[in-house]
Image (cartoon, grey):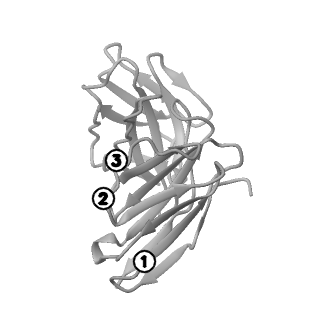
């Protein structure tokens, strides 16, 4: 596709379950970003990738959160043992290069933890 | 990392110019100023960015003060479709400790 895609668009899960969120960036974009947005709030930066490497993971909220990117393309954000406070919209973006480039955002995954 | 301060909300009449201010008084010399907007229930959309000089594109103009401590996004002829939350952020390129810090943004309401 022409834009960034994310799946699933909506995910409802029970507290304590693990979830995987997927992001397909624009083809050829080397940089990929994950954000979280709680209702009515601004974006919270989580992690970025340059190629398959994530130089700084300090933005991840806890050790229950992890992310990987393989083949310089698809990225997966995994949340283990989900908690109700993890409920939010998770947004993915990509850019041609890291830094100094506009980011193209996907539609997001709305995660609801019951 | 530079942080930004924006008014919580603003109104503008349709057809008028919307001027959205942003303070970034701790910005460093190599940090860009970016503007994005987010229409309800959609992902953010890039508008414009700049370093030192004023910039203009088909969507908006960006005016950056000489000391770079503040900027203004100008939508020259606002339409109802410009109603959105507008985010001003600063970005440090090519920094291994890179983080983007997004504030709560300005909710711009365009009124008929």
Give the percent coordinates (x, y) of residue A94: 58, 47
Chain under label 2?
A
Badge 1 marks a residue whose secondary structure is: loop
Image coordinates of residue A84 in percent, x first then y, are: 29, 77
Can you tell which mark lies on residue A61?
2
Give the Cα separation between the discs numbered 1 and 3: 32 Å
Q: Are marks 3 and 2 on the same chain?
A: no
| In this view, A57 is above or below A87 | above
> In the drawing, what numbered circle is on residue A90?
none
**Looking at the rendered structure, which numbered label has been put on residue B105?**
3
Residue found 28% across the figure and 36% down from its top: B3
> Which residue: 52% across, 68% down?
A21
- In the rendered image, residue B30, in percent from the top left (x then y), is placed at 40, 20
Do the numbered discs 2 and 1 sit on residues whose CB atoms are within 8 Å? no
- Label 3 crowding class (10 Å Cα cut-off): few <14, some 14-19, many 20+? many
In the rendered view, tell whether residue A63 sits above or below residue A47: below
The residue tagged with tag 2: helix, strand or loop? loop
Compared across the picture, whether A34 is left or right of A71 comes to left
Identify the subunit bearing mark 1: A
Establish if B69 lies above or below B110: above
Mark whose residue sits in front, 1 or 3: 1
Q: Residue at x 54, y 35 (%)?
A: A98
- Element class at badge 3: loop
Tell which residue pokes out farthest to the right in this image. A1
Q: Name the residue tied to disc 1.
A: A18
Cα distance between the residues tagged 3 and 2: 22 Å
Chain of the residue under the numbered disc 3 shown in the image:
B
């Amino acid at each position: 596709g022409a834009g960034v895609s994310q799946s699933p668009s909506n995910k409802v899960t029970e507290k304590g379950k693990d979830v995987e969120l997927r992001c397909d960036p624009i083809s050829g974009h080397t940089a990929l970003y994950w954000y979280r947005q709680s209702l009515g709030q601004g974006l919270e930066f989580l992690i970025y990738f340059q190629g398959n490497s994530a130089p700084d993971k300090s933005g991840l909220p806890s050790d229950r959160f992890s992310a990987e990117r393989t083949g310089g393309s698809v990225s997966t954000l995994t949340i283990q043992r989900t908690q109700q406070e993890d409920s939010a919209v998770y947004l993915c973006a990509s850019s041609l290069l890291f830094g100094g480039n506009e980011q193209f955002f996907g539609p997001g995954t709305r995660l609801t933890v019951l | 990392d530079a942080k930004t301060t924006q008014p919580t909300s603003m109104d503008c009449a349709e057809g008028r110019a919307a001027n959205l201010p942003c303070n970034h008084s701790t910005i460093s010399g190599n940090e860009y100023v970016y503007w994005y907007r987010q229409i309800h229930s959609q992902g953010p959309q890039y508008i414009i960015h700049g370093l030192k000089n004023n910039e203009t594109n088909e969507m908006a103009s960006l005016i950056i003060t000489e000391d770079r401590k503040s900027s203004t996004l100008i939508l020259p002829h606002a339409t109802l479709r410009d109603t959105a939350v507008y985010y001003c952020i600063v970005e440090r390129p090519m920094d291994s400790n890179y983080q983007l810090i997004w504030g709560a943004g300005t909710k711009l309401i365009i009124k008929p």
